[in-house]
Amino acid sequence: AREALAQAQKMEAVGRLTGGVAHDFNNLLTVIRSSVDLLRMPGLSDEKRARYIDAIAETADRATLLTTQLLAFTRRQPLRPELFDVAARIRGLEHIISTTIGSTIKMEVDVADDIGWVEADPTQFDTAILNMVINARDAMPGGGELKIRARNADGVPDVRSHAPAKGAFLAVSVEDDGIGMDAETLKRIFEPFFTTKEINKGTGLGLSQVYGFAKQSGGEIDAASHLGKGTTFTLYLPRSSKQGAASSSAESQSPIAEP
Ligand code: ADP
């Protein structure tokens, strides 16, 4: 009966999601469509033309994120773990991160070049970092500072009251000095579909992806937040000792394609 209930709840959630996503997606298509109509108007100034083109690009990116998150969630894409250099991977993301946060948010990346290697799905790693970055950006609507750090950790914190895992981990944190969260919100953030964002801005699936990725990679995700002060997410991944053997494989390090 418990399984049936879980199944029913899942079906309900999927139903809600499909409806919600279809609605969000249609809204985005409407924005693109009307921007195209505006672009076709004769005698358009260069400034307006540039603005409509930006709107189309930005809206298309949002639509892509929406479907990517949905696919990642519903398909539960199989992870393809590879050995990769965490510092190189983060460097490869810097450009897309700075485009994502815009010019009102300052970015600081504090990652030592020799921080180490992990064995995890590199594409999912990128997605997880970007999901946390998007949340940080949304938490700092008036600007602020984003810090991305990586350090070594002996074990993971006792986050959800299970025994702490021991061993060598790499801890990658994404920190913002934005709006923060109250304790009630913090408790629910990893639930699929939980969002406090307005329609079109949030799917509630970003942190579910981060959570799933962390767990399936043998790691952990931790969140610390203070209302009005900011939030720090820390992703723990088991450190690999196999790094030497793979350092010649440049292929596994290619960062995700830029938009
Ligand atoms: P979404 O971003 O689509 O809402 P997420 O699963 O990524 O979905 O996040 C769930 C919720 O967690 C957000 O709606 C927000 O309320 C809260 N949250 C996540 N990250 C932050 C952050 N850095 N600062 C404040 N609130 C956050």
Image (tube, rainbow, N blue to C red):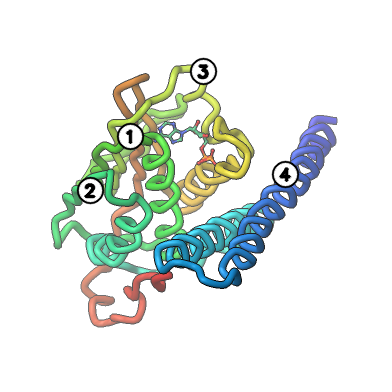
41 with respect to 250 (left or right): right
Residue at 34% in and 81% down: 251
Quadrant containing the C terminus in the rendered view = bottom left
The 10 Å Cα crowd at callout 1, few under 14, some 14 to 19, many 20 or more, is few
Q: Earlier in the sequence, mark 2 or mark 1?
A: 2
Instruction: Indicate which label's residue lies in the foreground, 4 or 3.
Output: 4
Instruction: Indicate which label's residue lies in the foreground, 2 or 3.
Output: 2
The 10 Å Cα crowd at callout 2, few under 14, some 14 to 19, many 20 or more, is some
Mark 4 secondary-structure assignment = helix
The 10 Å Cα crowd at callout 3, few under 14, some 14 to 19, many 20 or more, is few
Cα–Cα gap, marks 2 and 1: 14 Å
In the image, what residue type sits under mark 2? Answer: Met
Which residue is labeled 3 in the image? 184
Cα–Cα gap, marks 2 and 3: 29 Å
Which residue is labeled 2 in the image? 107
Res 41 quadrant in image: bottom right
Res 76 visible: no
Which residue is labeled 1 in the image? 142
Marks 2,3: beta carbons within 8 A: no
